[in-house]
Amino acid sequence: MKFGIITYLPHKENKDEYYSYAPYISEMNMWLKNIVKTLVAAPKTPGFPTQIETAYSESEIEFYQIPGMNFTNPENIVASLRNFPAVIVGVWKVMKRADHLHLRCPGNVSLIGCFLQIFFPRKPKTAKYAGNWDPEARQPWSYKLQKWLLSNTFLTRNMEVLVYGDWPGQSKNVKPFFTASFSEREKNEVRDKKFEAPFTFLFVGNLVEGKRPLEAIKIVEKLNFSERRGMDSDSEISADFDSQNRSSDRFFLTIYGDGPERERLEEYCRRKDLENLIHFKGNRPLQELKNAYQKAHFLILPSRSEGWPKAIAEGMFFGCIPIATSVSCVPWMLGGGSRGILLKNQQPVRIGQEVEKILKLLADQEKMKMMSDGAKEWSQKYTLEKFEAALKEVLKTSNGKSISPKGRDLGVGCE
């Protein structure tokens, strides 16, 4: 079978191998087991692979380079419109030659793929929608259009759409799904945590405005300040924070990830004299992250929007208590708050209110242990072995070789 992938993610070529963002490639390698040849339509960028990029390893790759599409400013809009025909041609070639079509959504390239797949109604297809599928979420019109096209069973035929969360009122081709990072054997490496000061928080993700890493920094800053001064929760963090006795600091934040916001975040930490509390690690391999999860007490992600926040699930696997915004399927992941702290999705974030929730939890050792154990129990249900088995079922179903059970029968739906 020739498996055709349509993706917006940029790729790099090095020594006849194709590299891209490691979590995406790791997942695709699981899709591609037992696939002889894979056709990939994606943008291509120059340079050598970085430490957070890896290569396809489970299939022979035939690469079809297409231009990237970006509509963030007038110059990029003009370039994208000029490149529009080349994108259509590249995607069309893959769709025509492949036996199975696989769309990675949402994205500008995948939006074109959503339209073009209409002309191949008999070919088996899958789509992985990695964003927020919540029908009530406020999203760009292009995302809503992709969701509408994918779930329209008249225009989109012979396709299974894999989404994060079990949302009411969906068409029959929309299936709840999940992803995974760790294996069954790695459960043996997990140890119970001692919730004693000093407390370590982690932020893992791209340093972009939508992930709100600055809010994570301010929460840890406020935790230390509130512990010392007993300030009113809604008051501003005082400018004389740096003059306080640093020996009383009990809360530390380690930030894994990189992006355009990093310089601004580091400047904030310098200006507020937080460099002893906040540590930037940049992009690091999964093994190093795993070590960090094992040592940390909390994982914080005050993001505005998510699909399946992989870092939250990874931290929970090792017993980190998640602190995350109540968006997409996060409330389900956190058991409505029984497995972690749900932050309100508001702008601006009321730092004082969220800090009060954390301080209240810190005063209850029994509850922290219960949350940590609950987080482990939930996340460890979603292992690589279970993920691979679920993928096999999806491919069998979409290629007409067997009748698929419901998503929740595979153990992949939301509770």
Image (tube, helix red, strand yellow):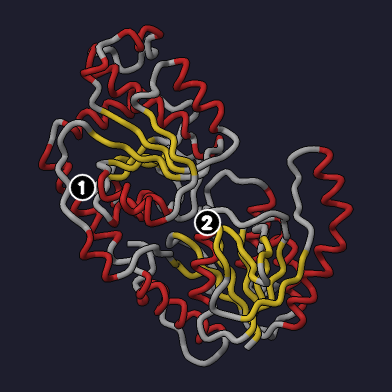
Q: Position of residue 329 (x, y in %)?
A: 42, 53
- Which residue bears the numbered disc 1? 371
* Image disc number at residue 244: none
Using residue 26 as the reference point, say whether residue 74 is left or right of it.
right
Which residue is drawn at the image coordinates 40% and 79% (left, top)? 389
| Residue with the most extreme front position | 15
Q: Secondary structure at mark 2?
A: loop
Identify whether 230 is placed above or below 119. Answer: above
- Which residue bears the numbered disc 2? 133
* Along the line of sight, the residue nearer the viewer: 176 or 61: 61
Assess disc 2: are there few (<14), some (14-19) or many (≥20) residues with their C-alpha within 10 Å of its C-alpha: many
Which residue is drawn at the image coordinates 31% and 37% (left, top)? 201
| Residue with the most extreme bottom position | 401
Q: Are marks 2 and 1 in contact (CB under 8 Å)?
A: no
Assess disc 1: are there few (<14), some (14-19) or many (≥20) residues with their C-alpha within 10 Å of its C-alpha: many
What's the CA distance linking mark 2 and mark 1? 27 Å
| Residue with the most extreme left position | 366
Residue 177 shows in this picture: yes
Q: Secondary structure at mark 1?
A: helix
Q: Position of residue 321 (x, y in %)?
A: 27, 45
* Along the line of sight, the residue nearer the viewer: 143 or 202: 202
Q: Earlier in the sequence, mark 2 or mark 1?
A: 2
* Along the line of sight, the residue nearer the viewer: 15 or 377: 15
